Image (spheres, rainbow, N blue to C red):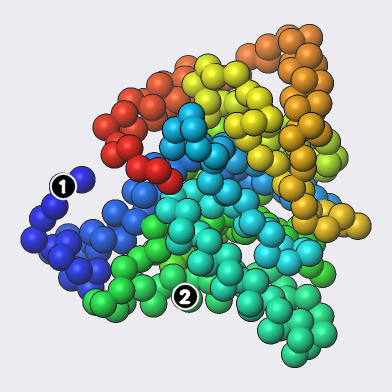
Amino acid sequence: MFRNQYDTDVTTWSPAGRLFQVEYAMEAVKQGSAAIGLRSKTHVVLACVNKASSELSSHQKKIFKVDDHIGVAIAGLTADGRVLSRYMRNECINYSFTYESPLPVGRLVVQLADKAQVCTQRSWKRPYGVGLLVVGLDELGAHLYYNCPSGNYFEYQAFAIGSRSQAAKTYLERRFENFTDSSREDLIKDALISVRETLQGEKLKSSICTVAVVGIGEAFHILDQETVQQLIDAFEIVGEDEPPVPEVGDAEADQAEAAAPAAEEGAAPMDI
């Protein structure tokens, strides 16, 4: 995308009915490191890729705990994600103090979407350049939502955002029908395999990925590196023994996976 006369501020419409600054914010999400979410009836799993700006620096944190029953993974501008996660924590604290019960996940997601939408309708503001995968557990069950910089939100069974997420989406689309009845371990396995799909041949290690879980009887928490590495080792051994299952849409999926990295090669090298 290139600069044009209709992207000077977020409130200027193009003749085609587009808000270019909102689209630019959504493009920032695509350039961020990948984040993946999966849910079953009882558990939700988040996984993300850790990127460091250099070999001498640590990676940016991509998964945040909001409350005991809610967590969030981000892709895009980390600073924006940190501000929004703090806002979500404050909303959970205020609701708990007022009503003495945990904030329903769906209500928090709507409030977050409303906050993002305001930034698309004020000329002195800019859209948040971050996409959020919000997961949680409430009286209605397990939830996985995606909040877009445009102010839209969607609930998913499984979803992936960020750089090279198309490869992970292809894997999830093949497997999502089994996620509803999956166990906690199976969800983590599928999440790690999805992360591996986004690495383009790079070996999956616990040092370059983060995994978090929330479920019935299990508060939201991030798994430590040793546990993640043990799971990676176990699942890769299992994967070698399983015969490949042919899929009808394999050819189309391979073309989509090949096209996605090619489209992202020209992306600006942003530390997001």
CA gap, disc 2 to disc 1? 27 Å
Residue located at (69% from left, 84% from top): 94
Q: Residue at x 64, y 31 (%)?
A: 207
Q: Tag 1: Cα neighbours inside 10 Å, few (<14), some, or many (≥20)?
A: few
Residue for point 81% across, 34% down: 227
Q: Secondary structure at mark 1?
A: loop
Q: Kindly identify which residue carries mark 1.
A: 2
Outermost residue toward the left in this view: 5
Q: Is the N terminus in the top left, top right, bottom left or bottom right quadrant?
A: top left
The foreground one among 179 and 89 is 89
Dot 2 falls on a residue whose secondary structure is helix
- 62 or 151: which is nearer to us? 62
In the rendered structure, the answer to whether residue 139 lies left or right of residue 162 reads right
Q: Residue 80: x percent and y percent?
A: 45, 61
Q: Amino acid at mark 2?
A: Lys
Look at mark 2 in the image and give the residue it sits on: 115
Q: Residues within 10 Å of mark 2 (few under 14, many from 20)?
A: some
